[in-house]
Image (cartoon, grey):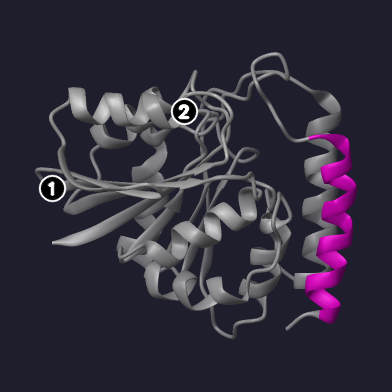
Amino acid sequence: MKILSIVIPSYNESNYIVKTIQRALEQNVGGFNKELIIIDDGSQDDTSKKIIDFLQSNKFNTKSLRPQKKYFQKDKSSVTLISFKKNSGKGNALKSGFLLSKGEIVIVQDADLEYSPANYPLLLQPFVKENADAVYGSRFISHAPHRVLYFWHSIGNQFLTHLSNMFTNLNLTDMETGFKAFRGDLIRTISPQLRSSRFGFEPEITARLAKIKNLKIYEVGISYMGRTYAEGKKIQWKDGLWAIFQIIKYNLFIR
């Protein structure tokens, strides 16, 4: 059976993480077995405890309970929990998850459910039907439900996407999306080179993909249920400024 790896970076997400895991496990992904890799990136709340309690209460078999790496198995699904002592940033968390993955396809799933696991079939379709190498879930080309939130965030996302496109010569509509999928062997080959520790992962991975000849990148429209800062949203205006630097850096100066 083929494996779908779902990498979930998490930092202080005790209010959402159990629902995220539950929905990821429940989602129908065709003939794939699911491999969830959750990185608790130095959370100061009880994120890890809630994950373990949920898995044990749902009769996942405990295969390993080492301090920083715990492994659970049930039927055709496995869950690996990696716990960092200190927060290292989304980029570092994703890199660790990618390198541990075994799947033919690897999906990035945020822990806060802004991006719904119900969209997995949309992300998988270009791999199955078009032999895609990478698929971006776009918030701007979809008729699916979108929560109405911050105007300037939307403008900032579009500006960063256009700036990135100018350097990469791609015609993406949503470079900054947190809902991306990759051919497993591809992302595991790229991962050792990744340098961005925080939200710079998005422009960096886009720049690195764009430099690979004959790579097939697709976009699909997805639903998006953004959250407010009061609900735990973490990205800030300074991350947008940093993304500009990252776009220039990884397109012009880093191979």
Above or below, 204 against 116 in this view is below
User: Is 22 or 177 nearer to us in this picture?
Assistant: 22
What's the amino acid at mark 1? Lys
Residue 189 appears at what percent x and percent y?
Answer: 48, 78
- Provide the residue span drawn in magenta: 236-253
Q: Is residue 232 above or below residue 162?
A: above
Residue 249 lies in the magenta-colored region: yes
Q: Is residue 114 left or right of residue 237?
A: left
Of 64 and 146, which appears nearest the observer? 64
What's the residue type where badge 2 is placed? Thr
The verdict on residue 74 being magenta is no
Residue at x 56% of width, y 34% of height: 43
At horizontal 13% and vertical 62% (from top left) the residue drawn is 1
Label pair 2/1, CB-CB below 8 angstroms:
no
Mark carried by residue 47:
2
**Label of residue 167 in the image:** none
Residue highlighted by disc 1? 76
